[in-house]
Amino acid sequence: MESFQKFKIWVLFFCMISELGRGYYLPGSYPHKYGIGDFLNVKVNSLTSIETELPFSYYSLPFCQPKEGVKDSAENLGELLMGDRIENSPYRFKMYTNETEVFLCQSKPLSGEEFKLLKKRIDDMYQVNLILDNLPAIRYARKEGYFLRFTGFPVGIKVQNVYYVFNHLRFTVLVNKYEETNVARVMGTGDGAEVIPTFGNAGSDAPGYMVVGFEVVPCSIPHNADSVKNLKMYEKYPSPIKCDPSMVAMPIKENEPVAFSYEVSFVERDIKWPSRWDAYLKMEGAKVHWFSILNSLMVIIFLAGIVFVIFLRTVKRDLTRYEELDKETQAQMNEELSGWKLVVGDVFRAPSNPALLCVMVGDGIQILGMAVVTILFAALGFMSPASRGTLISGMLFFYMILGIAAGYVAVRMWRTIFCGDHKGWFSVSWKVSCFFPGIAFLILTILNFLLWGSHSTGAIPFSLFVILILLWFCISVPLTLLGGYFGAKAPHIEYPVRTNQIPREIPPQKYPSWLLVLGAGTLPFGTLFIELFFIMSSLWMGRVYYVFGFLFIVLILLVVVCAEVSLVLTYMHICVEDWKWWWKSFFASGSVAIYIFLYSINYLIFDLKSLSGPVSATLYLGYSLFMVIAIMLATGAVGFLSSFWFVHYLFSSVKLD
């Protein structure tokens, strides 16, 4: 009987999991129930533009402010780092209550500075971003028979050297009746529905609605300054307002005020709450996107398979041929034959700057582990676009935790190079904890000064700088030192052969070996360049990136190809008696970062043609440099560790005198 009860509990558990997965009810993303007449408060985010990539506060322009004053909404670390500044707004609705001609406010006469700033924001095509129930306002525009989707709406428009502001907004809130059957059906009792929170005064028996869409149409309407002079906020405008988005009629002029108004209508749609983000996640040319990725993956798998098969056959034939000889013949071949057998006494000779190599490999493992775990969680839906800032926050969290892995790998590699010597492990651990974070801190500080000088909300506040430094030295550094301690206690990897005291002279090469190393990055770049376009578009063109499942597959393929490329290059180097393979194996796969940076410059020139100003270009190049350094460390660590394993396996497979 007890086993049967356990069986029922497990069945119930899996039913709940399947039901929640079907509805995408992830933690913190439950639907909100609003009763008729409940207030819906609209929030504002930073003004953004793909022309400058510099976000600014919504209230930096002479817009209406709420009666209770401007208040910051609760923000996480990721939102602050991304430049989001979510604040309350004067726009408020009543659930399922249509309103028209709602007067909001009339600004003070525009000063010369406000007039110039407003014109500059219109010239730079800045967008106003509104949020209702965690949904960004979406705008539809018809062009050549197609409907285009945009998040937000422009501040204004310039027509024949005259600047017009969009001062009237027509909102459409899409709602769906609230259903309390999902959890109740799984639990078998009506009490289960109480798990999902409710808002307002809507009781369990009162009809409730969920917000499943938020659309906006901006209009430029001329308001009579005298007629709105005595109106208070939320009072009805005295005359009808016709919102025609194809007409503009409210020019801005210096020393003249601007009046703002809005209207709202509620439309019931058959859109389920878990599907309400579908409108934002649709990409133009989605079929081309999927086909290009699949085609790229197939080509890369095919090429990598050919390289891997040829490589295995070559090494296997070489080893088999050598092992078939007797000992006397082997000794004679050791003196006569050229190739990897002649570098047996030098192949494990310590490289130049061994501490730096260990530090870079340790940081690379930390970055790679962070990328794998973050993308995996994002692919499972725990870091969806609906949860702003969770992706960046998750990356920071996983990076700090994986400091243990970075310290362990670096210190154990250090002890292996020096044949088990414990001396210097603390110094290596400390350098690992400061190398990449120090580079990141330097780049972000320089870029932050540019953002501070531009008065952009993208600038990291000083208090956040202090928090990041505390996280670095209070969490990341101790965990890295702890990993280094474990690495110092772990047994080092013993070399299968002894190293000669006198290094062997490397024969002159027909071509520079570093030229081949730099060219090796083209194959790993082939796994990335199509997906890289969509990533860059989401970062710099304001599009939503959501295909984390494909990104995870691309990441795994990148790791495999980097390992294969480094193996091939390392084998080629030791075959020509070049025993200095350590750094070359790192940069053979790490050189993909060079091509990514060149691609970033190409994207800046040909895709971000409208990016205006040296500050915007400097920010773009600075963030691109930060990205490629991280990629170089991660891919280089994969290449080096795979090459080290191969060399160790190769020279331990045969006995060489």
Image (tube, rainbow, N blue to C red):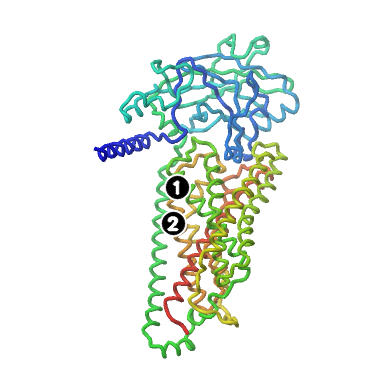
Please identify the quarter of the rendering in which residue 82 is found. Answer: top right
Amino acid type of the residue that numbered disc 2 sits on in the rendered structure: Leu
* Residue ID at (75%, 26%): 112
Relative to the observer, which residue lies in front, 496 or 68?
Answer: 496
Relative to the observer, which residue lies in front, 556 or 480?
Answer: 480
Label 1 neighbour load within 10 Å: few <14, some 14-19, many 20+:
some
Whether residue 125 is visible: yes
Q: Are marks 2 and 1 in contact (CB under 8 Å)?
A: no
Whether residue 632 is visible: no
The answer to whether residue 654 is above or below residue 311 is below
Residue underneath mark 1: 376
Image spot of residue 318 (x, y percent): 40, 78
The answer to whether residue 597 is above or below residue 48 is below
Image spot of residue 148 (x, y percent): 48, 33
Please identify the quarter of the rendering in which residue 412 is found. Answer: bottom right
Residue 8: which numbered mark, if any?
none
Q: Secondary structure at mark 1?
A: helix
Front disc: 2 or 1? 1
Which image quarter is the N terminus in?
top left
Q: Secondary structure at mark 2?
A: helix
Relative to the observer, which residue lies in front, 587 or 282?
Answer: 587
List the single residue furthest toward the left.
1
Residue underneath mark 2: 557
Instruction: Give the Cα distance between marks 2 and 1.
Output: 14 Å
The answer to whether residue 645 is above or below residue 175 is below
List the single residue furthest toward the right.
112
* Residue ID at (53%, 76%): 347
Image spot of residue 566 (x, y percent): 49, 66
Sequence-wise first label, 2 or 1: 1
The answer to whether residue 516 is above or below residue 5 is below
Image spot of residue 206 (x, y percent): 40, 15
Amino acid type of the residue that numbered disc 1 sits on in the rendered structure: Leu
